[in-house]
Amino acid sequence: MFKDKIGKASEKNRSRIVLALDLVEASREKLLRKSFSLLENLSNLICAVKINRHLVLPLGLFDGVKKIVGFIHRFGLPAIMDCKINDIGSTNLIIAKNYFRAGFDALTVNPIIGFEDGLKPVLSLAHKNGKGVITVVYMSHKGAKEFYERKVLDGGKPKPQYILFAEKSLRWKVDGVVVGATKPRKIGEIKKVLGEKIPIYSPGIGVQGGKAEKALKMGSSFLIVGRKIINAKNPIKEAERIRMLYG
Amino acid sequence: MFKDKIGKASEKNRSRIVLALDLVEASREKLLRKSFSLLENLSNLICAVKINRHLVLPLGLFDGVKKIVGFIHRFGLPAIMDCKINDIGSTNLIIAKNYFRAGFDALTVNPIIGFEDGLKPVLSLAHKNGKGVITVVYMSHKGAKEFYERKVLDGGKPKPQYILFAEKSLRWKVDGVVVGATKPRKIGEIKKVLGEKIPIYSPGIGVQGGKAEKALKMGSSFLIVGRKIINAKNPIKEAERIRMLYG
C-alpha cells in the first residue's frame, strides 16, 4: 500500500518533506543531470518525490522520467506523479496505466470529475496494484478562491466546495488529499473532516507564501516543497532546515 | 487567430468534425503508423485534430507527438491538445509553453482553477502567440452529474456549475468551450449564455451515446469524434456519414 511506503520512508528519514522536482532547465541533459544530483544530495532528508509536467513534457515519460523514477526507488523513496487527472473514465485509465507502467507509486486526481466513470476506474486500478490516489481538495494559488472556496449546495445546504471535496474524498477512500498551505485555516477545517483517516499533503510552502510550521500545526502530514529547496543556494541546508521544524 | 484557422479548414473541407486521435496500440511504431494513416485518409473530411494523453504519454511530446502535429499541419488543419490544464499558474505556463513549442494551435483548460494565477497566464501566453484556449464547461461522462451539474452560489443565487463556467468563459474571452453531447439540452442552455461569441465543441458522439444531429441543432459548432471513427471498419465512410449530417 502507498500509505505504508511513504510512512516507512518518512520514519526512516525522519522527514515529512515531499520534494517537488519542478525543474526548469534549457536542455534535456541539464534536466536529467540536475534531477539526479538533487536526488543524490537530498534522498535522506525527504520521504517522497513528486514529479510534474516540468519533467514529463520535455523529457518524455518513458525516455527520461522512467529513469528518474527508477533512481528515486533506489533510495527507498516513493514517486508521486502530480498529473491532476481530470478526464472521462476511459482516458483517465490510459493516463493512470501509463504512469503506473513507468513506475509511479501514486498519482493526483482532480475530484471535479466525480466518481462514476471518473475517479472510480482510477481508484480501482490503483488499489488493485498497491498504488495510491491523492485528490486535490484545495489549491494554493490566488484563483483557488474563485471556485474551490465557492459555496455549493449539498442536499440543499450551502458549504464550501473544498469541504465537499474533502467529504467525498473520505467516502471514496482515497490515499491522501492536497490542501494548499497558503491558507492554513483551511487545513484545519479539512483536518476536522478527515480526522486521522486520510493524510493531508500541503504545497505552497515558501515561494507561494505558506508557512511550514503553521501547516503542520493545523493538520498537514506532509509538506510538498519544490522551488524553496531546489532553487536554494544550498538545497541540503534548506531541506535540513525545513525538516527540523517538526524534528 | 485560432478561430480563423479552424474556420478556414472547416469551410474548405465542409466539415465540423474534430478528429480525436485517441488511439490505443501495443507499440510506439503502431501508434505512429495508425496516426499517419488515419490522418492521410481523413484529412479532407475533418476540420481539426485533437490529441490526448493516449499519444503524448507513450510517444513523448517531442519524440513522437511533434511529428504527428507537423503532419496535421501539412493538410492545413489545426492541432488541439486536450490537456485539460488544471494546475497553479507557473505550472500551467510550463505545460502550455511545451505544447505550443511542439506546434499545437490550441489547448483545453479546466475552469475550476479560476482566473487569477490560473487561467490568466495561459490565456495571455496563448493570445500573444495567436493560439487558442478552450475551457471544459460540461463533460460527457456519468460522473459529470456530481459536480458539473451541482448548484453553486453566485452572488447568493444558486445556478448549475456548468452555467457559471460558461458565463465565466464568456467573460474571460476564451476561444471555445467543450460541452458533452450526451445531454443535448445542456448544449442549448449554454448556447443561450454564449450566443455567437464562443463556439461549442461537443465530444461524446457515438460511443458515449450522444447524437450528432441533436448536438448541432442545439448549438454545437464542432463535433469531437474519436472512437466512433477511428475504430470503425471503414473510418472514411464513417467520417463521411457524420459530415453529411449537416451538409
Image: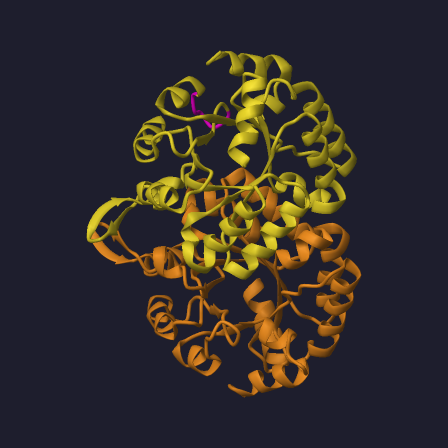
Chain colours: A orange, B yellow
Whether residue A245 is visible, yes or no, is yes
Q: Is B190 in front, or is A237?
A: B190
Residue at 74 percent of width and 41 percent of height: B64
- Left or right of A68, for residue A209: left
* Magenta segment includes A55: no
Q: Does A117 appear above or below A212?
A: above
Which residues fall within the magenta stretch?
Answer: B207-211
Name the chief secondary structure element in magenta.
loop
The number of discs equals 0
Residue A154 percent coordinates (x, y): 25, 51
| Quadrant in the rendering for residue A239 | bottom right
Q: Is B238 in front, or is A76?
A: B238
Residue A71 percent coordinates (x, y): 75, 66
| Quadrant in the rendering for residue A2 | bottom right
* Magenta segment includes B208: yes
Q: Is A41 in front, or is A208?
A: A208
Q: Quadrant of the N terminus of chain A?
A: bottom right
Residue B74 percent coordinates (x, y): 71, 28
Residue at 43 percent of width and 54 percent of height: B113
Q: Is B219 in front, or is A4?
A: B219
Q: Quadrant of the C terminus of chain A?
A: bottom right
Residue at 39 percent of width and 78 percent of height: A218
Whether residue A129 is visible, yes or no, is no
